[in-house]
Image (cartoon, rainbow, N blue to C red):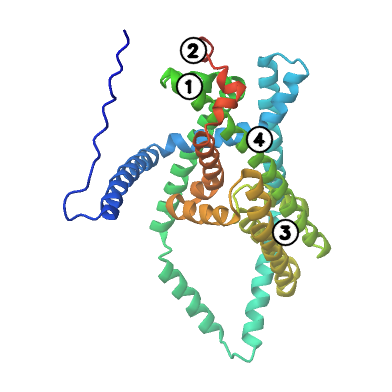
């Protein structure tokens, strides 16, 4: 005989006497928010302490996303994995090195002319000031120059400390570049297996969600780098054409420098465009420099107001305002690395959170196919 027993009702938690229900709920949300904020603060602290390792790894991830289409294309052509990896890495490093070498080589080759024109432009500027209605004397100019040196504290100690700082920075950059290249090779060759192995660190029931959210975030990074290449190309063409029509020398190095600098969102292209303004000032005078400055600022306005917020925002599925705020906040918190990684990190986190919130892995065949034996390989 089946006897049905009544289910025990769960006790209803009521706020203490005299505490409003709204305040009780606000308190419950507040302490949870504080726990999350504390965990995030600890995570940020750890990342800052390990920045010498984290930054090269993040650079390697972005470079792997940039090189992924070539690797995938070679695999489609039935290249063995090791040969596809080797070809991708060699081609990618060769292209980047060639572009940098072209810029540096042209600048070194034209350095003598650039130096002479700079000295001549400075002398012309001094002559202009002496003959101007401002009635500036040569003694005043020398006094201003000496005051600048004193205010800037430029002496032998400054030079020595600056040289030591540069040598230390170069050493750190070389170590970071080595880590990034080493990680890039393995990210290209074994990226899927590495991520599959990392999913084994989670409980088995959570592995489909972790695997699927990671793949969704990776696809967003692929979209990000494709759009960033397009934005960099637009910047390079716009500023390069401006330099060409003004009749400036070093047009190709200027365009390539802008293209490479544009991979730092919003500010990179502007900094690289300063080279074009300097060349225009030295070779053609202040009027051409002013026109070149207007061209650089115009191109950057198109990037900052249209391409970055709208095109980039649509590609990475975040609001244009979030793109601008992410870059500003990243620069404030972490300087240049923060500006470089702000948009891809925000895009990745946004897609992962959305994927998990909508339980998208339940209808994702790739995520559901995860198996312990496969992910552990």
User: For mark 1, what is the residue?
Assistant: 207
Q: CA distance from mark 4 to mark 2?
A: 30 Å
- Which residue is more in the foreground, 162 or 2? 2
Q: CA distance from mark 3 to mark 2?
A: 65 Å
User: For mark 2, what is the residue?
Assistant: 372
**Snapshot quadrant of residue 317:** top right
Residue contact between numbered discs 1 and 2, judged by CB atoms under 8 Å: yes
User: For mark 4, what is the residue?
Assistant: 66
Q: Nearer the viewer, mark 3 or mark 1?
A: 1
Residue contact between numbered discs 1 and 4, judged by CB atoms under 8 Å: no
Residue 321 drawn at (x, y percent)? 57, 57
Vertical position of residue 217 compared to residue 25: above or below: above
Q: First in sequence: mark 4 or mark 3?
A: 4
Q: Nearer the viewer, mark 4 or mark 2?
A: 2
Q: CA distance from mark 1 to mark 2?
A: 9 Å
Vertical position of residue 121 compared to residue 184: above or below: below
Bin the neighbour count of mark 1 within 10 Å (Cα to Cα): few under 14, some 14-19, many 20 and up.
Answer: many
**Snapshot quadrant of residue 121:** bottom right
**Snapshot quadrant of residue 249:** bottom right
Helix, strand or loop at label 2? It is: helix
Residue 30 drawn at (x, y percent)? 30, 49
Q: CA distance from mark 1 to mark 4?
A: 27 Å
Image point 40% across, 39% down: which residue?
A: 47
**Disc assigned to residue 35:** none
User: For mark 3, what is the residue?
Assistant: 113
295 left or right of 157 in image: right
Helix, strand or loop at label 1? It is: helix
């Amino acid at each position: 005989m089946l006897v049905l027993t009544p289910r025990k009702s769960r006790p209803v938690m009521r706020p203490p006497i005299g505490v409003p229900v709204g305040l009780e709920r606000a308190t419950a949300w507040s302490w949870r928010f504080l726990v999350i904020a504390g965990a995030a603060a600890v995570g940020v602290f750890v990342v800052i302490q390990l920045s010498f390792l984290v930054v090269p790894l993040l650079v390697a991830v972005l470079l792997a996303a940039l090189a992924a289409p070539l690797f995938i294309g070679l695999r489609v052509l039935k290249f063995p994995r090791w040969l596809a990896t080797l070809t991708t890495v060699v081609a990618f490093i060769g292209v980047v090195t060639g572009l940098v070498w072209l810029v540096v080589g042209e600048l070194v080759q034209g350095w003598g002319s650039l130096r002479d024109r700079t000295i001549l432009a400075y002398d012309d500027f001094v002559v202009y000031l002496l003959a101007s209605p401002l009635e500036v004397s040569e003694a005043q100019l020398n006094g201003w120059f000496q005051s600048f040196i004193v205010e800037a504290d430029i002496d032998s100690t400054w030079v020595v400390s600056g040289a030591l700082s540069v040598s230390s920075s170069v050493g750190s950059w070389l170590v970071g570049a080595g880590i990034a290249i080493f990680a890039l090779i393995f990210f290209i060759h074994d990226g899927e297996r590495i991520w599959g192995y990392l999913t084994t660190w989670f409980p088995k029931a959570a592995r489909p969600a972790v695997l699927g959210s990671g793949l969704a975030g990776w696809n967003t990074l692929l979209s990000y780098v494709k759009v960033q290449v397009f934005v960099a190309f637009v910047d390079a063409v716009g500023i390069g054409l401006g330099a060409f029509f003004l009749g400036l020398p070093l047009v190709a190095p200027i365009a390539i420098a802008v293209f490479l600098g544009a991979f730092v969102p919003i500010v990179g292209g502007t900094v690289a465009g300063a080279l074009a303004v300097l060349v225009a000032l030295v070779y053609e005078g202040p009027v051409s420099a002013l026109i070149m400055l207007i061209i650089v600022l115009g191109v950057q306005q198109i990037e900052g107001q249209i391409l970055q917020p709208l095109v980039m925002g649509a590609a990475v599925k975040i609001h244009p305002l979030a793109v601008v705020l992410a870059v500003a906040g990243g620069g404030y918190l972490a300087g240049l690395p923060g500006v470089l990684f702000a948009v891809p990190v925000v895009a990745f986190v946004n897609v992962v959170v959305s994927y998990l919130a909508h339980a998208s892995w339940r209808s994702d065949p790739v995520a559901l196919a995860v198996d312990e034996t496969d992910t552990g390989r």
